Amino acid sequence: MIEALINPADPPERQREKLLEIVQVLMRRVERATDDSGAAYAQFQRAAMLEDQVIARTLDLKAALAAAERANASRSRFVAAASHDLLQPLSAAKLFMASIGDDTVAPRAREALHKAQNALGQVEGILGALLDISRLESGPQAVSVGVVALDQVLGPLRDEFAAIACAKGLALRVMPCAARVMTDPPYLRRILQNLIGNAVRYTVTGRVLVGARRQGATLRLEVHDTGPGIPEAEQGNIFKEFHRLNARASAAEGMGLGLAIVERACAALGHPLALRSQVGRGTTFTVGVPLAAGTAGAGRDARPVSAPPPAVNRIVALVENDADLRRALVLVLEGWGVSVIEAVSGEEALALIDEIGILPDCVLVDQRLGPGQSGLEFACALRQRHGAVATAILTADRDPSLRSACQAAGFALLLKPIDPVALRAAVAVAEMAAAA
């Protein structure tokens, strides 16, 4: 090939020059090829090192995420367990106080009793908020969506806040709505309870209005107030945990968890949450909830009928392994003229019922009875042995799976701390259901 580039007719000197030029060109090409291959190899080495670093960093991040998830799950379990242990004595204290009639104590002692009840109510609210936060942090399994009639949520909330609003001189109006929506009933109640509670708490004069508006396939639940309003600069912060506009507010005015729970619950349920506020004019919170198929619009006021007191001479079987709470429940029930059969475990209760040969009119059973049967297992065993008996499961567990299991079995669910009014209603409703 080189010979073809050299003309044999050229003088020898010219041929040598030509040959030298060819050699120099070839050397330059070899050098460039060497440089290029070296650069390519260096780039390959750098890419390999970067890939190794990315893999190592990814593994580190996965390990850190797994550790964070384990820590979060551990914290949630701790909060749930600690709250359950605290709710037991709290339930007992509330029921012991409820067993003391106002007419049996002096006026001064009556005032102290009411203050103690209010203080316990604040503790109950704090524990409830911590449990809600713990559940919402546990993931999508925290919510259980189903069809609920909106009036079943709005009616009790209206009754709950009517007296508080009246005492402050506020006009509270909850518009009736017969619509059915797709949501988690306890969480929707908590969302509206927190929004209405804040509206009543911070509104000094004027009114609080709760209503619903249809917007396509969505029902917009709105809570309006004529309170002081929220500055625009603060509107992005009010949903943070423990954030309060009034930093000097007392514990009685809340811990700053209410709106954090509202935002997290709405996010978990997929319910859009919106805020409009103007300083000096008031605030409106809006929650969008999907309408259930075939739902009706606004309708009659479905105010729930208050449950009658349990009938005198009724027999209630009480299965509770906490001695203080069991004694408190007995005092309240006997104060209503109810005869109580006490047992510490499901096995003891079954044996006692078989021994005396009397089937109770209603059963109240704690879900966590220690070793042996759970409350739900006992209730199912009692039904299998003696047929249907009106039953309410007592628990501090907010797990949706337990609520679903009770609904599927036809048992009522009564959450701790047990409110005497809720207890009275649960027993009466259970009796009416059994008599139907």
Image: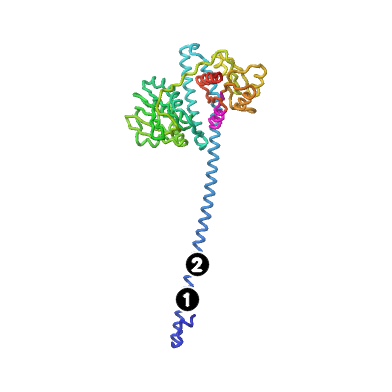
Give the residue at the far front of this rendering: 294
Q: Position of residue 59 (x, y in %)?
A: 54, 49
Disc 1 residue type (three-letter): Leu
**Residues shaded magenta:** 392-408
Q: CA distance from mark 2 to mark 1?
A: 16 Å
Helix, strand or loop status at disc 1: helix
User: To which quarter of the image does residue 205 belong?
Assistant: top left
Q: Position of residue 14 (x, y in %)?
A: 43, 85
Q: Which residue is mark 1?
A: 26
Helix, strand or loop status at disc 2: helix
Quick one: label 2 or label 1, which is nearer the N terminus? 1
- The C terminus appears in which quarter of the rendering? top right
Q: Position of residue 149 (x, y in %)?
A: 46, 28
Q: Callout 1 environment at 10 Å: few (<14), some (14 to 19), or many (20+)?
A: few
Q: Is residue 401 magenta?
A: yes
Q: Which residue is mark 2?
A: 37
Q: Callout 2 environment at 10 Å: few (<14), some (14 to 19), or many (20+)?
A: few
Kindly tell me whether residue 257 is visible in this rendering: no
In the image, what residue occupies the spot 47% across and 36% down? 268
- Between 218 and 24, the one lying in front of the other is 218
Whether 409 is drawn above or below 30: the answer is above
- Between 344 and 322, the one lying in front of the other is 344
In the image, what residue occupies the spot 48% across and 68% down? 35
Whether 311 is drawn above or below 292: the answer is above
Disc 2 residue type (three-letter): Ser
- Residues at badges 2 and 1 in contact (C-beta under 8 Å)? no
